[in-house]
Image (tube, grey):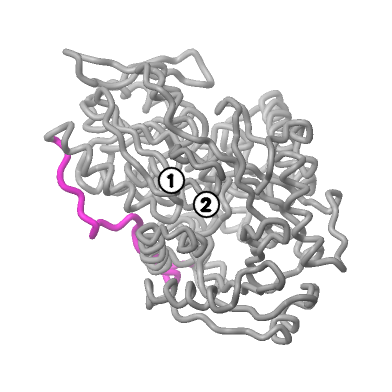
Amino acid sequence: MTAASSPCPSLPWGPGWREAAWAGLNRPWDLIIIGGGITGAGILNLAARCGLKVLLLEQNDFASGTSSRSSKLVHGGLRYLKQLHLRLTYECVRERQYLLNSIPGLVEPLDFTYPLYAPGGTRPWLMKLGLSLYTHLSPQAGTYATLEPAEIGRQFSDLARMGMIKGYRFGDAATDDARLVLRVLSDGLRAAKGNALALNYAHVDGFLRMGGKMAGAAVADRDSERKGEAFAPVVINAGGAWADAIRAELGLAARLRPLRGSHLFFQQQRLPIPTALMLEHPRDGRPLFLLPWEGVTLVGTTDVDHPFDADEEPFISGEEQTYLLEALHARFPELHLAQDDLLAVQAGVRPVVRHGKKDPSQESREHILWDEKGLLTVAGGKLTTFRLIALEALRSARALSGRIPRASAALPVVEEADPACLPNGLDPLLARRLCGRYGSAADMLLRDHPDLRDPVPGTATVWAELAWAARHEAVEHLDDLLLRRTRLGLILGEGVNALLPRIKEICAPVLGWNEERWLREVERFQIARRASWGRMGGSSISRGTGSAS
């Protein structure tokens, strides 16, 4: 069992925090943010550092939408160069380097190998030109290297050599997207020193207006009968895939084009890759990623229209699974990968601004802000550029309220954490990982749970992380704990079931769950995991929506 947690007033979520939050919801705020993904987290973080009183409302769990279902990349967007989106690429490579420097252990360097095949693939001279520009935009990231097929074959022994004419190696970065949201949120809340609140499972039922101006929001607890009102002169809609539904409360027409991106996960021994690969799909040339991530191999992504209700859990379609497996069959023919080999799947919905492009992949990923009837909506953008989006949102908010100060690009988004401050004898890689994920709280996490420092079998996660999340990270449901605070429900697939007894022993007492509540939570988690993350893709096989390219 775990040791009792030592009190620390700087921790944003702790015992009794939810009741206190609802009791104080109607105190005056300078800013209300709707949406607890990476964009909302970034805005809260920087607003709190500007000295503002900030309230963030998330209708489900933090990072439960697109921000936990991305390709896990903090990248410059090499393919955007092909589309001549030079500004977006420039912003991405600069922000990638900023995050690499700021959050080591959570945003980590990742080398990519990009083999080229003929006929039909990108020509080497064009790739060389693109990579020259790509690496020039961020000199700190290093240079690229040209590779011959024999060298690529030695590194990726299962990769098809037939038709391979050349390859390139370049640098990018990867992250745990859900943990990035939690780190940005928690560090922002600590910096606020009690002047900010992030509340999950809090649905905005409508807007409050005074004298024709925006005055706040009506809020309902998704898990109880509690209702409340929150008042602020500025409301920012950072709802991601739900942004149009939020705007509809004011009678505004839809402006987004929801696009689904889906991923496959394999055990590393079934699809072994020593480092990341970028492959062009043999059918249409669209680039795909293969990443070693959290002990598994991730393959993605697709880009298809998603004409379903935003409140429905997104599903990978049969066409998308076929499309991704088709690429693997072509480039790893000797592995004979099939649907039965899938450990898990994941689908997320990108809140892309509609520009009328026929091909979904041609729609711009740049963000846009709209001020409509006093509601400031931010839509589009990339995980990588969340800090720039937050800065622009706060600068736009100044036009709506004199209380909003000028936000500076010099504001940090995380607090520095020193791995050397962790308990003696800790593995250096684990120390780096924990500092990246928990910042200055990493030391307390380990000291509060000295008997839970061993890793969960088959993962880099330690048991103490589950105990810490249960006590300090606003966990309301078991899926919060196993799909977002940790990724055990994703990277272990069905194997997570064998761990449930120990998870119950560690976490249920902290969460105050009796046997009946635990069984309800397990049932809820299993339904969610099998429907949206299970290897068969839930009921999505009959829900295809056209080409997966």
> How many numbered markers are drawn?
2
Q: Residue at x 49, y 62 (%)?
A: 82
Residue drawn at the location 48% of the way across and 42% of the way down: 473
Where residue 124 appears, as percent x and y from the top left, is 59, 77
384 relative position to 528: left or right: left
- Of residues 451 and 466, the one nearer the viewer is 466
Tell me whether the residue at label 1 lies in contact with that at label 2, contact meaning CB atoms closer than 8 angstroms. yes
Residue receiving disc 2: 177
Q: Which type of secondary structure does the marked residue at label 2 adopt? A: helix
**Residue 346 found in image quarter:** top right
Residue 50 on image: x %, y %: 20, 46
Three-letter residue code for mark 1:
Ile
Residue nearer the viewer, 309 or 522: 309
Q: In this picture, is 456 found above or below 367?
A: below
Left or right: residue 92 compared with residue 519: left
Q: Nearer the viewer, residue 330 or 248?
A: 330
Say if 384 sits above or below 480 in the image. below
Q: Against 143, is 185 above or below?
A: above
Q: How far from the left and from the top, in percent, is residue 212?
A: 19, 14
Q: Which residue is at a point 70% across and 25% down the rendered structure image?
A: 520
Q: Which range of residues does the magenta coloring cover?
A: 403-422
Residue 95 magenta-drawn?
no
Give the labeled residue for mark 1.
38
Q: Is residue 21 visible?
A: yes
Residue 319 is situated, as x and y percent measured from the top left of the image, at 75, 42
Is the magenta region chiefly helix, strand or loop? loop
